[in-house]
Amino acid sequence: MELARTAKVRASGMRCSSNKLGVTLLAAFLFLFLGPSCPIGAAEEEFQLPLLMPPALTSTFCEYRNGHFHSGIDLSTESRTGVPVVAVGSGYVYRVRASGVGYGKAVYLLLDNGMFAVYGHLESFSEKIQSFVLSKQIERERYEVDVFPLPFQIAVEKGEILGHSGNSGSSSGPHLHFELRRGAKAVNPLAGFYPLEEHIAPTFLFVKLTPLGIRSHINDRDSSLRVDLSSVSDRRTYGTSVVPRVAGRLLVSVSVFDRTESEPNRLCIYEVKLFLDDSLLFESRFDEVEFSRTHEVDLAYDRELAKRGENFTLNLCRFEGSKMSLLARLKPGAGIIDTDLLQLTGLHTLRIEASDIAGNTSTASVQFIVDRRPRVSLVSATREGASLLVTAQAEDPDGQLKNVWLDYRLGTFGGELARVAMSGEVSKGPREETGSYSIELSLPGELKAASEEELVGIFKVVAEDSLGAVSCPFTQALTGTSELRDVSAELTVELKGEHVKILVWVSPPFLRPRIGVARGDTLWLDVEEKSEALFAAVYELEPGASDAEYAICTLEEGRTRLVSITRPLGVFSARKGWEGTSWNKDARAGFRYGPETFYKDTYISIRKMDREAPPSKGLTFASDIFSVEPGDVVFDKKGTVIIRCDSAVAVSDRIALYWRPPDGTKWRYAGALVDTLERTVSADVRGLWEFSLLKDEAPPSVFIVHPSRGRVYRTTQPPIYATVKDVGSGITWQGTKVTIDGKKALSIWDPKISRLSVEHHEPILPGKHVVTFEVTDRSGNTTRASSRFRISG
């Protein structure tokens, strides 16, 4: 990979004087007084590369990061620190930050053309920048500073060294993070500023199809399907022999990445397009992204896969409520395929084109067949002399019924089922087919004398269409006068977006339950037999859903009700544009939302879970555990989880709200906004998981690595650092302090390596000294550790 050493930059707008000071003054004036979104013009200018070494790209613009887009590019420093970092253009230092997190040591330039250049994860600043930063650190008595010099206080020329590359902040290894910004937007540095010269086309891995809504399915299932892709000889064309059957509304996602000749890293592509039978449905180009919308990365990418480390799977649609400028040209819902709305039938082709910044393009194609699943709606069995007449109603939305099968067993509830084909008459509608099917079964000798009330048997009917789609079975049983033993049912409720799935396990497995929702009157639902003993029904939620609705399941034999169970749905509606607070049934846990918390109307469930043993020593539960769902909902603005504290615990005594991800790993601190009157603790969140209140009485552990007790140093700036661990609420830089002989030192808290260290800004005089590390976690637990050392004269 080669990046051009310089690049032409053109900015439209007013013409500026060629005098550099005048250009910079004008840019500063417009930015400070008219705001960052003001278009600032500039004369034609060339940008220099930000590193004084041959460039190698390791990450590109708009890649997935946890909760935000990658707003720049990463340049390799060959796993070393200390590479000179230079100003890409003339201007002045607008902002400097020194931190143990985020960009670490970072420099922000305001360039003469009005753009910003950002350099992150530096090891050190240039002398004049460091002098300014150090003065602010000493003034504020802390290492962490985020400061804004006056315009021209620190002027820089193009090519001037600003510092040296490093690994500071939230960096996973030595490199330079570089950004270009225009006002409040991050701009792709490779799009017109630093042309990329390489010849490897993007690589496709798979296409993921996801059914959306209760009437959508793929291969007769309501779950996603991953279709792996393979390349033809040219490595620019990808396809598959898999042809899924689909129906309803579908989301298309694609896993695709780019590479360069010089680095093995997977990189984000630049442009992607989705076609349905040569009609363009969706397109996106990663030119720029607003910082105010960077959290929409969880809409642009498949968040479920990204959380598992598969960071290059893009959702090819514009979701409802999305405000990213990347997709501003598209209507909400663009890219989502609705086979019913489009009246699709038969075979169709999805084509995806992916291009990198150098213009190399690859194409992937996947075919699918629109085929709605047939359905069996009724089965009955009646005695007719020495025979038993079994009838069934079947229908197919696509008008392609082929076979209807009966699996049956007579005279007993146990043993193998025999299969026979049923015959029937079909009536055709505009598209659908409906058929009445029957078969007459001869009764075996021992049953011929039995009365109809004495007959027992199991009858399971399935329908198949001409494309191979098979209906859910419909099982009906004759129980005669047999006394059924151990009759039971278990009911669970799952929130699935805008509907609730009610699952019922029954015993014995041939009893077909009735499933409904009570909201005053009972609404009985269509029941599907998912597998032996497992039945399901789907209830479509409506705005205004509340905990007054109950799921109901009954098992009946004739007119006798054998089992009846109910369970509250526990679902609340959060309307977009509204605000409110929803509580669980006993008001022990709630969720507060604002007008912009969600992108669309959303349904929330708060479910109390079983208590567990304390997570660790010194960390105990101060409330029940609550599961707040759905876990896959994407927030626009934060919401607030509220939990009421146990009555036996003082609510303000080191108690905070914690969350736990679905994988069941350790509890993580969320926040601690305490309301002593209501005895609640709350925290703002950007996701729904499991939540609980925990009391943290475990102080941090501090192990001093340097200096070890009694150590003698010849240098006046010896390494001084400690390893700090905490099992509960965690450590922030505000809770750390290091003193040398009682005088506060500048100390850096680096959470990625759990290290608290001293950054020297003056020599330590010869003689004996005492260093003390003081660490306080978010709950107020404090640990102090000291060590004596000596500087030799």
Image: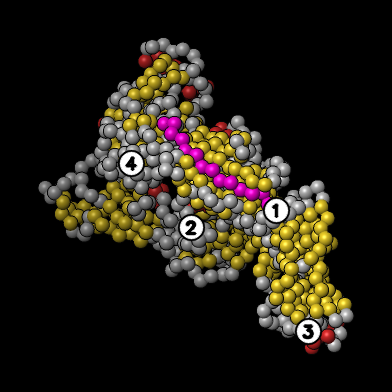
- First in residue order: circle 2 vs circle 4: 4
Marks 3 and 1 sit apart, C-alpha to C-alpha, by 39 Å
The type of residue carrying mark 1 is: Arg
Residue 728, horizontal then vertical, whole percent: 45, 60
Q: Is residue 459 visible?
A: yes
Count neighbours of disc 4 (C-alpha within 10 A) and say few if under 14, some if 14 to 19, many if 20 or more: few
- Above or below, 58 against 686 in this view is above
Q: Against 93, is 614 above or below?
A: below
Q: Earlier in the sequence, mark 1 or mark 2?
A: 1
**Residue 313 inside the magenta-drawn segment:** no
Q: Secondary structure at mark 3?
A: loop
Q: Which mark is residue 372?
A: 1
Q: Is residue 693 left or right of residue 480?
A: left
Mark 4 residue element: loop
Whether pointer 1 and pointer 2 mark residues with C-beta atoms closer than 8 Å, the reply is no
User: What residue is disc 3 on?
Assistant: 444
Residue named by callout 4: 263
Amino acid type of the residue that numbered disc 3 sits on in the rendered structure: Pro
Task: Report the span colored magenta.
Answer: 357-373
Q: Quadrant of residue 480?
A: bottom right
Amino acid carrying label 2: it is Arg
In x, y percent, where is residue 577?
Answer: 69, 41
* Mark 3 Cα-neighbour bin, 10 Å: few <14, some 14–19, many ≥20: few
From this viewpoint, is residue 654 visible?
no
Above-or-below relation of 85 to 63:
above
Residue sitting nearer the eye, 707 or 379: 379
Residue under the image location 53 percent in, 60 percent down: 662
Q: Residue at x 77, y 76 (%)?
A: 477
C-alpha separation, residue under disc 1 versus residue under disc 2: 44 Å
Residue 35: percent from left, percent from top: 52, 25
Disc 1 to disc 4, C-alpha distance? 46 Å
- In the image, 407 versus 129, the foreground residue is 407
